[in-house]
């Protein structure tokens, strides 16, 4: 029996930028609860699990309806570990426990609570409609264009980051650039099982989301700014009841 979509919420316990961020109250709820509630509003998700090494995060997730079928091994919970082996482990462990196979995997990080459920549903439809694609990644248009303003220092001199930037004399003429914003990632599980990384020769679609919703929280300042956007109503979250 094949299932369609497994969602994985990775929540490591040892955050250095903002300790305890995943369970820190954000707009009235633990930060991780927002992603759990969002996932429940995506009808295409067959199962959503939390991958964590922390009993505290696991307990908070369960209090808010989260599914924590295992604790992540310590070797997959260091600050140096990439997300790819974490996802491969989660997929393999869930399929081993269920004795069933999933066709797609969604990565939805608790530190990006601004995403919307309908964005994931739409992205999933686009991925399924493009069999040649190895995944679809959330991107957004940044407030500045790297072609126009980004520079590096080389031999003591300011140097354009983009080697052909000097050929553009007007800001309006530079190519449109998007950034990977971390809101969500979707892949066929066949790709997840075989690839060495999510960029390993992959043919990827991009799914454009609004930049104002594309915040990622890794520091206290980012946490406070994001919370202000939500509490002010500038970035409403549909799973929060109106007062």
Image (cartoon, grey):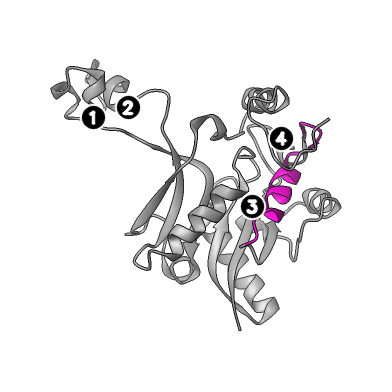
Q: Is residue 240 above or below residue 204?
A: above
* Mark 4 or mark 1, whichever is nearer to me: 1
Q: Position of residue 241 (x, y in %)?
A: 80, 38
Image: magenta residue range: 26-43
User: Which structural element holds mark 1?
Assistant: loop
Q: Residue 162, labelled with which disc?
A: 1
In the rendered structure, the answer to whether residue 175 lies left or right of residue 166 reads right
Q: Residue at x 71, y 46 (%)?
A: 13
Q: Nearer the viewer, residue 38 or 159?
A: 38
**Labels 2, 3: front one:** 2
Q: Residue at x 26, y 19 (%)?
A: 171
Question: Residue 134: horizontal and vertical position, in percent?
Answer: 39, 62
According to the picture, the residue beneath numbered tag 3 turns out to be 10
What mark, if any, has residue 146 been given in the picture? 2
Residue beneath disc 4: 19
Residue 101, horizontal then vertical, whole percent: 58, 78
Mark 3–mark 4 CB contact (< 8 Å): no
**Which callout, 4 or 1, points at the residue further toward the start of the chain?**
4
Q: Quadrant of residue 67?
A: bottom right
The answer to the question of whether label 2 and label 3 lie on touching residues, with beta carbons closer than 8 A, is no
Q: CA distance from mark 4 to mark 1?
A: 36 Å
Asked whether the viewer can see residue 82, the reply is no
Q: Tell me: residue 82, above or below residue 227.
A: below
Image quarter of residue 221? top right
Instruction: Tally the marks.
Output: 4
Residue 39 in sight from this viewpoint: yes
Q: CA distance from mark 4 to mark 2?
A: 31 Å
Residue shown at the point (63%, 75%) measured from the top left: 95
Of badges 3 and 4, the one in the foreground is: 3
């Amino acid at each position: 029996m094949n299932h369609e979509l497994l969602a994985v919420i990775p929540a490591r316990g040892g955050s250095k930028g903002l300790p305890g961020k995943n369970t820190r109250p954000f707009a009235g709820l633990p930060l991780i609860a927002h992603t759990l509630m969002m996932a429940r509003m995506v009808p295409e998700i067959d199962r959503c699990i939390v991958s964590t090494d922390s009993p505290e995060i696991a307990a908070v997730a369960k209090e808010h309806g989260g599914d924590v079928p295992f604790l992540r091994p310590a070797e997959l919970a260091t600050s140096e570990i990439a997300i790819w082996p974490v996802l491969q482990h989660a997929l393999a462990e869930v399929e081993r426990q269920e004795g069933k196979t999933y066709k797609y995997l969604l990565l939805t990080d608790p530190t990006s609570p601004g995403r919307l459920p309908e964005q994931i549903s739409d992205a999933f439809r686009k991925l399924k409609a493009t069999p040649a694609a190895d995944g679809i990644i959330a991107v957004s248009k940044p407030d500045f264009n790297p072609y126009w303003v980004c520079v590096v220092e080389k031999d003591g001199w300011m140097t354009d980051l983009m080697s052909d930037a000097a050929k553009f004399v007007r800001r309006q003429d530079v190519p449109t650039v998007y950034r990977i914003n971390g809101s969500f990632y979707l892949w066929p599980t066949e790709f997840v099982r075989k690839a060495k990384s999510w960029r390993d020769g992959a043919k990827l679609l991009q799914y454009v989301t609004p930049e104002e919703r594309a915040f990622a929280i890794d520091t206290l300042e980012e946490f406070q700014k994001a919370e202000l956007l939500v509490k002010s109503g500038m970035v409403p979250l549909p799973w929060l009841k109106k007062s």
